[in-house]
Amino acid sequence: MEPRVSFGGSNSGFQVGVNHGSILVEALDPLSELSGVPEAEYGSYKDQYEDECLPGTRTALLDEVTTWARSPHGKCIFWLNGMAGTGKSTISRTVAAIFKNSNLLGASFFFKWGEADRGNAIKFFPSLTKQLMLRYPELGDRIRSAMKVNPGITSKSLSEQFDKLLYQPLRGLAPQRPELSTAVVVIDALDECGNEQDVQTILRCLPLLRDASNLNIRIFVTSRPELPIRQAFSEISDRSFQDFVLHEMISKDSTGQDIALFLKDQFTKIRASRRLPLSWPREEDLQTLVTMSVPLFISAATLCRFIGDNKWQPTVRLAEVLNNQEKYAMKMENTYLPILERLLAGQDEEDSERLLHEFQDIIGTIVLLVEPLPVKTLAELLDIPADVISNRLESFSSVLHVLDDQDLPVRIMHLSFRDFLIRSKTKFRVDTPHRHRRIFLQCIDIMRKKLRKSLCGLGSDSTVKPKCHHPQASRQNIPLEVRYACNHWVYHLGQSEDPTAEINNVLSFLTENFFHWVEALDLVRERITRLVELSGLLVMLGVRNSETFA
């Protein structure tokens, strides 16, 4: 074999060899510079054992995606977004399989955070180009010419790579066979691309492919609803994409049915491999696991891996889960930790400390509240500007249900996120007793400030009149943060690190504001319940009721 060595670098376009003492100079094919990421493609060796949707699950969504791809009037991009763990990647693999089997799959790229070239966009466009060349051989000559004119194009900016390697070569390309006129590109987990600016550049470029006049390019994209991605889509014309919010568009009942099918399939495999009786698991136990998992498929998958671990007896592991349903939540670390770590990405030590402090104040409070509160109410309760809270919540839209309307409550999407934060051994761990104490103090502060005046326009601080029982009077005269504080300060104190240490705070508040507090409770019809709770608290603190107002 003749030796060949490159000369002048990979962009020189030449290679030098020696043949029987003669020096040969040969032109390199520019396409040899085009390197993709085989591990990121659908069907790669590395991902060969990853799950696809079970038959009979996600049927409505898969039908909608298939119809979108085949329709000549469909929009260029179908954006499937959903919170962490809802099964987006499983759906992506299924979509890729459907289109591959129907000869519609043009290319695919499955991003994966932290995995070499799968965790960034350096080879994203070259990878798509290489795959599309296999579908359209005539594309090769166009790309070869482009690379000759633009040497080193694969090391240029993303927008230039897109223009020279995809957009320009695809424009006007006429496929040799009519059935190849449609090509679906599947892009999974775009949020796991390490550079936010690269993500936004990709989303600015992709809609331009609709102008590839002789081809029907369809792009299926999945991601979490992270802020940079939502911002990028907000800048794209409505005629270019349609979105499908997985955790909103598919009902809880439908998701529960699909998770039940998944669990039954997995337990059938566990039962067969471990030679367990057909009566295992019981139907009621299976339903408990469904309830624990909804709406997270990853939660169900985590449970199955935990129970089916070959080192342990499945029947014992299932009993452990059912007897201590919070224990398995720690297995969710791989789902939640990457989301949290991104909060600190690129920050120096000082800014990281500040962000962690705000995380504890805001997210730590949200996960421990008795009932969800809107941003405006949180701002009043925490004494933090609403825009600061909104800004921080933008980083957690894949685990918290955050709406644009600041008057609507912020909700945890799945209790496993709360359980993870409470039991985590990472720097994001929420010190539950300490945080409950902080919430208690914030409740006391709110009530002291806002219960000074008699509510409902009553003339006496200690008189509650029947006319104020009207529900509308409650809504009009008691701000939500005051209502929350009145209803739940006793609970938060009871959950704090050392309730007895706050006895002076409690007695001072009750001495000054007891009748204001009772008046507010009467308006929201919570007087009896909360007074019973107070009585129990005073007993715990060693205070006799008769001494409270002495």
Image (cartoon, rainbow, N blue to C red):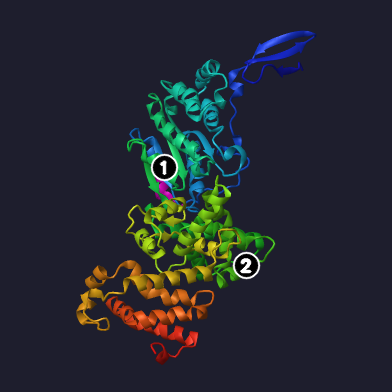
Q: Nearer the viewer, residue 468 or 44?
A: 468
Disc 2 marks a residue whose amino acid type is Arg
Q: Position of residue 438 (x, y in %)?
A: 47, 69
Q: Tell me if 176 is positioned left or right of 17 in this view.
A: left
Question: Per the image, is 60 magenta?
Answer: yes
Query: According to the image, label 1 marks what residue?
Result: 79
Q: Which mark is residue 403?
A: none
Vertical side of 42 occupied by 20: above or below: above
Q: Which mark is residue 317?
A: 2
Q: Secondary structure at mark 1?
A: strand
Of labels 2 and 1, the one closer to you: 1
Whether residue 341 can be seen here? no
Residue found farthest to the top: 22
Q: Which residues are magenta?
A: 56-64
Vertical side of 237 occupied by 456: above or below: below
Disc 1 marks a residue whose amino acid type is Trp
Residue found 41% across the figure and 26% down from its top = 215
Q: Please tell me in which quadrant of the rendered image residue 312 appears.
A: bottom right
Residue found farthest to the left: 467
Q: Please tell me in which quadrant of the rendered image residue 66 appears.
A: top left
Q: Position of residue 487 (x, y in %)?
A: 37, 75
Q: Tell me if 44 is positioned left or right of 401 in this view.
A: right
What secondary structure is the stretch in magenta mostly built from? Answer: helix
Residue found 35% across the figure and 32% down from its top = 72
Whether residue 248 can be seen here? yes
Vertical side of 187 occupied by 385: above or below: below
Q: CA distance from mark 2 to mark 1?
A: 38 Å
Q: Does the residue at mark 2 contact the one at mark 1 (Cβ under 8 Å)?
A: no
